[in-house]
Amino acid sequence: MQVKPLYDQQYICARVALGDQQAFALFFNHHWPQVYGTGLRLTKSPEKAQDLAQDIFIKLWENRHKLTEVKEEDAYVYILSRNVILDFLRKKVFDTENIEALIDYFEDSAISPHEKLEYNELENTLKSAIDQLPGKIKDVFVLSRVHGLTHEQIAKQLNISVVSSKTYVVRALQDIRKFMALHTDNTAIILAAGAILYGISK
């Protein structure tokens, strides 16, 4: 005698696709550990993993009609979850304020050699982004973020106004953000940057 599975994926997907909320509750309970676990593994943050898992299930419900075309439900849910989480991390990493946090991280002499090795590709991408800054914008940025000079000191050294010094730093961060967004498609780099940022915020 063949035992009927406790969770019939094909039947549940068909019911969810028709808008059956009770079926979606079963779908939710079945996939929550997988979705939350994916979020936790990629973000290293229980709170953000929970928030992202909820967003993912909202997305799944909003696109429930697609479930009728799904042949491998677990794989479909995993891929969607991973894409949503990576998209979130990509946007977070390339926020201007977070670019500054990443730069500060790599300027910290207390970072262990192991961490340096682990995040080497991300650090190299950041260095490339700084190197491509034009003329005085790069000069001001390096004096400010690498050498720790104040805007008053920079203005005096480069014979510019304090306002110009501040403006150049803002412009530099914007240019670095754009460079990183264009040159960082590597998932490992995005995950490493996300791990750094969540570590900074704890």
Image: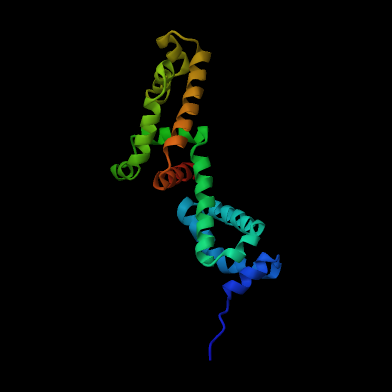
Residue 44 seen from this side? no
- Tell me where residue 140 appears, x and y as whole percent: 42, 18
Position of residue 7 in the picture relative to residue 106 (left or right): right
Please, which residue is most extreme toward the bottom here? 1
Q: Is residue 144 left or right of residue 72?
A: left
| Residue furthest out toward the front | 69
For residue 114, above or below residue 34 = above
Q: Is residue 114 visible?
A: yes
Q: Position of residue 95 (x, y in %)?
A: 52, 36
Farthest residue toward the top?
159
Vertical placement of residue 111 versus 35, above or below: above
Q: How is the image coloured?
A: rainbow
Place residue 31 in its image quadrant. Answer: bottom right
Image-quadrant location for residue 180: top left
User: With respect to residue 24, does 3 lie above or below?
Assistant: below
* Marker count (numbered): 0
| Front one among 139 and 13 | 13
The answer to whether 74 is drawn above or below residue 126 in the figure is below
Q: Dividing the picture into quarters, in which one does residue 80 lie?
A: bottom right
Residue 89, percent across and down?
A: 50, 45
**Which residue shows up at 55% across the image and 53% down it?**
47
